[in-house]
Image: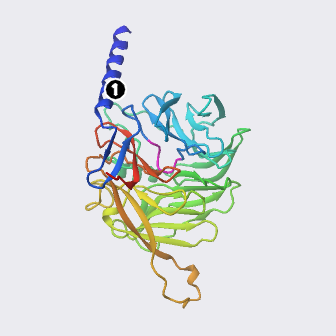
Amino acid sequence: MRILGLLMIIALGALSVMAQDLPREWVDPDTGHRVIRLSDEPGSASLYFHQNAYTPDGEKLIITTPTGLSTINLKTRAIEKVVDGRVNVIITGRKSGDIYYLKQGVVYATNLNTKTTREVAKLPPRTSIASVNADETLLAGITDECPPPPAPVPGATPAAPRGDSYPGKGEMMERRLAERRPLRLITVNTKSGAVSTLLKGTDWFNHIQFSPTDPTLLMFCHEGPWHKVDRTWTIRTDGSKLTQIHKRTMNMEIEGHEFFSGDGKMIWYDLQTPKSVVFWLAGYNVTNGERVWYSLQRSEWSVHFNVSPDGTLFAGDGGGPSSVAAPGNGQWIYLFRPEMVPDRTDGAWPNQKEFIQPGFFKAEKLVNLEKHNYNLEPNVTFTPDQKWIIFRSNMLGPTHVYAVELKKATS
């Protein structure tokens, strides 16, 4: 045990030295934008692009580390551990600011200021939780009605790592879709623990997200190879108003990686008409069904997009050499300024309000990710003050959390 302890101390010391050797701050020579390394511990990462990682006051950012969960004060950059041990992060509560996470079949919430932890709900067997609604009264996730898969056969290929792109992902997606495993889309009451089933099916339900403002609106997807599924849907928490958000109009058209705008009024998603040829970021108004499509160049396509809290700016994390936009995809953190195509029809068409409103993105490169390995997606998010974009990257070797300033450096 003493030898093991010494080895752990040596390993932690080596990691500390590695972190000290990495630059803390620099101006990207290719873009002129200031980049800051926010994390200290190698292996730290920001959350998935649609998981809310910010406290309601906009002061703190939640990150994962190899040893638990920590906050970063966005003003002072001070790092503070709040949860010890590896857990599955769900979301930072939009009302309370507590961090919700899953550990051994139980959902917990920890207050980021007091560090007090409460048990929210014990989950039924084979249930996973992916989202918490705007007023923190409901959790949402899926229950797998099949027994757990058999243990891996000795010598078999190991399971693929979690992420959006990795070797063998396409084969895994095909195989999982073909299983047609019975699933239930569910909610769990955070006070009583009562479980409600919203939808049953043999489709692969995934990417579950509550609206950031409407506690009764839930979005989810039919997961699988995007050219084989009708992906993006919404449903109300009473099980009503199941709505398909996008209906394809051509063969090999794909859409996905959907997310809500900060005010909950829009659903945005990556749209390709057809796959790997023509690229859009498409928007759907959840109130009136109106649509906006912004076109972008192949080199600007990103694995994940995001939108600023006020809806005026967009961002993307680029793509790697094996991405859907390869060859020609750019490995950059992008800032996009949207513009609409001028309407010169003078209202000539009676049904003009039903038309898609076309626009385009004017792109600005913020960070060169030439040395980033896209087996780890950067997953961009805007800070609440809209002055920075947060992302995770292995561009300097170990994975860390970074911020890039939207305005260019003055010197």
Name the residue type under label 1: Ser
Q: Using the image as rendered, state which of residue 36 and residue 181 is in the foreground.
A: 36
Q: Main secondary structure of the magenta part?
A: loop
Query: Which residue ends up furthest to the top in the rendered image?
Result: 2
The scheme the figure's colours follow is rainbow
Figure check: 342 above or below 337: below
Residue at the image point whose x is 41% and y is 63% from the top: 336
Residue 8 appears in which quarter of the rendering? top left
Whole-percent x and y of residue 280?
Answer: 42, 68
Query: Which residue ends up furthest to the right in the rendered image?
Result: 192
Span of residues in magenta: 46-51
Q: Using the image as rendered, state which of residue 45 and residue 406 is in the foreground.
A: 406
Q: SS class of the residue under badge 1?
A: helix
Does residue 392 appear in this view? yes
For residue 58: magenta? Answer: no
Whole-percent x and y of residue 282?
Answer: 48, 67
For residue 50: magenta? Answer: yes
User: Which image quarter is the N terminus in?
Assistant: top left
Query: Which residue ends up furthest to the front in the rendered image?
Result: 411
Residue at the image point whose x is 30% and y is 26% from the top: 17
Figure check: 206 above or below 290: above
Residue at the image point whose x is 30% and y is 35% from the top: 22
Q: In the displayed structure, does residue 29 sit left or right of residue 109?
A: left
Question: How many residues crowd around disc 1 within 10 Å: few (fewer than 14), some, or many (20 or more)?
Answer: some
Whole-percent x and y of residue 332?
Answer: 32, 55
Residue at the image point whose x is 49% and y is 27% from the top: 85
Residue 305 appears in which quarter of the rendering? bottom left
Does residue 252 appear in this view? no
Whole-percent x and y of residue 381?
Answer: 46, 51
Which residue is disc 1 drawn over? 16
